Amino acid sequence: MKTALDGIKALEIAEGISGPYCGKLLAGLGASVTKIESHDGDAARRVGPFHGDTPNDEGSGLFLYLNTGKNSVTLDLHDEDDAAIVRKMAEDVDIVVENYPPGELDSLGLGYGDLAKVNAGLVGISITPFGQYGPYRDFAGTDMVVHALSGELYLAGRPGREPLKKGGNLSEYHGGLNGYLAAMNALIARTRTGKGQHVDVSLIEGATAVIGMAAMQWVYTNRIAERRGADGHLWPNGVWPVKDGYILAYSRPSADWWSMFVTMMDKVGVPGFADPKYTTPDGRAESVEELDGMFQGWLSGQAKEKVYHLAQAEGLPFGYLATAPDLLASPQLRPREFFEQIDHPKAGELSYPGAPFVMSGTPFAFERAPMFGEHNDEVLAQYR
């Protein structure tokens, strides 16, 4: 089957999460992606979890997930002979993805300006915490720093309490996704102009863009958006404990919503919510402790998926807080075949999260991640 990016070639001079995730998406859609690793290897190879809980260069779950479908070659970018090989490789590719600190590749003669001299159609994707220019350009930045300086961290959590960071490394994955989207747009532009371009992806700008209304609240009302958590919302918004975890309850300011909630509670044998004093939002706001007691008294004996399905049957937008085992067994994700089984010579056959989208005509391909320097002979022989 023909792939979406059939014939497209990419070089990945990146490690960690942001650049490799961009390269992973390109590879999954059929681009030939060659990953250049230093003689120490991508730092992600040393990040757990490790298969069998035994650290080794070929068993990192992070590396194996982020580098599916790529070739791996080892080169020392600080060695002029190896740097010359990279320049030769750049003559024959469409895209270069990198996430080195600004200016570092330029100092080695491997920046976009250098590579574009030998390939005018080259699309360069640079992904960094703060971008290629600006006063913070050379500052160090982690996912936590990006969440803090983007304004996102200030908004997460309950009022009067410390801010809460969202789980995972969202800004880095988001940066990789933005890099991929920008690469696609730059390739389309190249079909019209014949020229490539350099794309400057800033993690902080990507994070700030997705919470843009927080900035707009200040612009429009001169008020700073505050942490709200579940406070300030209609009862019963928030996270509630159940016997096997937690559920998320969400309400809307409408009589229909309350009627649906009361119907659900009547069906499970908790009729007290039908009391007329709870009918209006103001009435519920004045009776929060009573409502909490009745609702939590019932929830404590319930399973999270049961509550979820009871609520959804009435049209209530409840959810449950899924753990990793829940995700792998998900009755929604399993029929969609989201998780892929991939076999690796060292790590064995394991489940991996799939693509963030489904294409009917040119589906995402899932091939294993490369072993360290696995393709040195195959790829580098033509450049030496």
Image: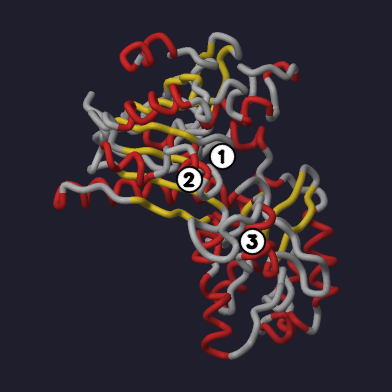
The earlier-in-sequence mark between 2 and 3 is: 2
Residue assigned mark 3: 264
Q: Residue at x 49, y 48 (%)?
A: 127
Between 306 and 320, the one nearer to me in the picture = 320
User: In this orientation, does residue 350 appear?
Assistant: yes
User: What residue would you read off at disc 1?
Assistant: 17
Q: Residue at x 45, y 23 (%)?
A: 82
Pick the front one: 364 or 113: 113
Task: Calculate the distance from the C-alpha at mark 2 to the C-alpha at mark 3.
Answer: 43 Å
Q: Nearer the viewer, mark 2 or mark 3?
A: 2
Identify the residue at horizontal 38%, vertical 52% (top origin): 199
Mark 3 vs 1, N-terminal side: 1
Residue at 84% across, 73% down = 290
The residue most toward the front is 80
For the residues marked 1 and 2, what is the alpha-carbon distance in whole angstroms?
Answer: 8 Å
- Mark 3: amino acid: Met
Residue 208 as seen in the image, left or right of residue 377: right
Q: From the viewer's perspective, is the residue at label 3 or at label 1 nearer?
A: 1
Under tag 1, what secondary structure?
Answer: loop
Could you say which is closer to the camera, residue 219 or residue 272? Answer: 219
- Residue 44 position, x and y percent, is 62, 30
The one nearer the camera, 260 or 213, is: 213
